[in-house]
Image: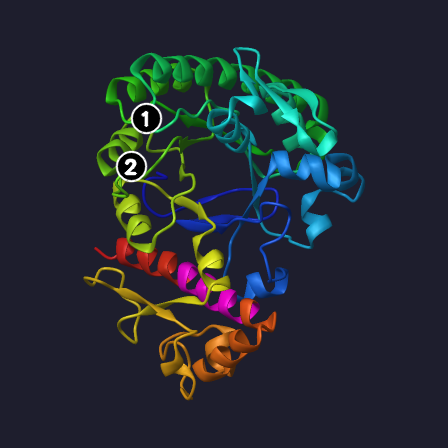
């Protein structure tokens, strides 16, 4: 049963769930390398199909032996479909393209404003060429304020595109199956906005197609910034318990804890590394990490002048490389002089906070 703690077989080793995947959008988690990530206990990464197809190009990555070899990472990698970025861009400014049942027609500014059609089939082909362990179907994500008619149309497209992704995946697996010791996993995305009926209709259309797992599509936060926990709970309930659930783009520690309780096992977000680069550090409120405690963490802003003479680590209970070797005062100094080491050490700390969070959540749910 995947609804609690379980393990997924992948071509790059077993993936223990629950797990947090840092975003390595362009083939890198900014400011840290693979040994840093391993040292933090990171179990997998997420790369972006669209961005990598543009730069350095999927042909180059394929010639290098795939995304794992290209970036020196031998643990699982998930690839998102690339659709969210294109859809967000087009819906914020129609001059960037249009959306039809065929796919996403966009103006490729990286290639001299060339008009390009990004289809479900193309997304799956790129993900195969990257060599991802976990692939995600192209879906149509509605705006948070989408009308009922617009929302229903995105559900229709999401189901139709998932069927085309499934067909292309099966075709390529038949042609290339001999290359895999463990076949890549294919996840579909459940859309429907904040409308329970549309969520149910989307899941109803996806389940018969037979996917390895399911993702939460759309915006996990409401426009007021609160967690859409009713929709997250409903979406989890609409998918089988024996299939893993991926809460795409969901990242605050308290939201990860809440969503795991609702049945989600895989999480990805740029938040810990983005916060690290701005000097915002996650700190447990107790020496022994306890995500079940109220207000179990707080943020320390390393640039604050009060930290200048602090000879203690960022967090006394943290086992990360940064806390084991450097003081808060030293990190303050690095940020003060703008040295790149500041971002690396801060990112290592925040990533370890997140991986320990998932480890502690798993330990808590294993208890009788």
Vertical position of residue 211 compared to residue 33: above or below: above
Along the viewing direction, whichever of 49 and 281 lies nearer the viewer? 281
What secondary structure characterizes most of the magenta part?
helix
Image quadrant occupied by the N terminus: top left
Vertical position of residue 305 compared to residue 106: above or below: below
Residue bearing the label numbered 2: 223
In the image, 53: left or right of 182? right
**x, y (%) of residue 301?**
38, 70
Image quadrant occupied by the C terminus: bottom left
Q: Is residue 11 magenta?
A: no
Residue contact between numbered discs 1 and 2, judged by CB atoms under 8 Å: yes
In the image, 207: left or right of 224? right
Q: Residue at x 74, y 42 (%)?
A: 56
Q: Is residue 349 magenta?
A: yes
Residue bearing the label numbered 1: 145
**x, y (%) of residue 123?**
61, 26
Q: Magenta region: which residues?
A: 344-355
Q: Quadrant of residue 198?
A: top left
The residue tagged with tag 1: helix, strand or loop? loop
Residue 170 appears in the figure = no
**x, y (%) of residue 254?**
28, 53
Q: CA distance from mark 1 to mark 2?
A: 9 Å
Vertical position of residue 36 compared to residue 66: above or below: below
Residue 140 appears in the figure = yes
Label disc, if present, on residue 57 of the rendered structure: none
Q: Residue at x 42, y 39 (%)?
A: 248
Instruction: Compare marks 1 and 2 and give the one earlier in the sequence.
Output: 1
């Amino acid at each position: 049963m995947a609804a609690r703690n379980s393990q997924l077989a992948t071509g790059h080793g077993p993936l223990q769930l629950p797990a947090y995947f840092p975003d390595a959008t362009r083939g890198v988690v900014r400011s840290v390398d693979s040994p840093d990530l391993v040292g933090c206990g990171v179990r997998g990464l997420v790369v972006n199909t669209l961005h990598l197809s543009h730069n350095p190009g999927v042909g180059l990555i394929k010639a290098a032996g795939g995304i794992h070899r290209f970036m020196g990472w031998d643990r699982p990698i998930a690839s998102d479909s690339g659709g969210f970025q294109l859809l967000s861009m087009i819906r914020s400014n129609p001059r960037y393209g249009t959306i039809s049942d065929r796919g996403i027609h966009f103006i490729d500014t990286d290639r001299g404003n060339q008009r390009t059609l990004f289809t479900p089939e193309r997304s799956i082909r790129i993900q195969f060429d990257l060599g991802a362990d976990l692939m995600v179907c192209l879906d149509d994500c509605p705006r948070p304020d989408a009308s009922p008619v617009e929302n229903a149309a995105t559900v229709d497209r999401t189901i139709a595109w998932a069927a085309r992704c499934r067909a292309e995946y099966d075709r390529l697996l038949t042609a290339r199956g001999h290359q895999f010791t463990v076949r890549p996993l294919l996840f579909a995305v459940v859309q429907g906005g904040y409308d329970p009926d549309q969520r149910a209709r989307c899941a109803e259309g996806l389940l018969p197609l037979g996917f390895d797992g399911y993702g939460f599509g759309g915006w996990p936060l409401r426009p007021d910034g609160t967690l859409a926990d009713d929709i997250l709970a409903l979406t989890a309930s609409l998918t089988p318990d024996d299939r893993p659930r991926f809460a795409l783009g969901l990242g605050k520690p308290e939201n990860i804890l809440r969503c795991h309780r609702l049945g989600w096992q895989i999480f990805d977000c740029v938040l810990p590394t983005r916060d690290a680069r701005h000097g915002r550090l996650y700190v447990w409120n107790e020496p022994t990490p306890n995500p079940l405690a109220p207000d179990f963490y707080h943020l320390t802003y390393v640039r604050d002048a009060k930290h200048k003479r602090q000879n203690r680590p960022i967090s006394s209970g943290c086992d990360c490389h940064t806390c084991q070797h450097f003081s808060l005062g030293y990190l303050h100094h690095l940020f003060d002089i703008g040295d790149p080491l500041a971002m690396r050490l801060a990112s290592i700390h925040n990533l370890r906070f997140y991986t320990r969070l998932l480890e502690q959540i798993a330990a808590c749910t294993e208890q009788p």
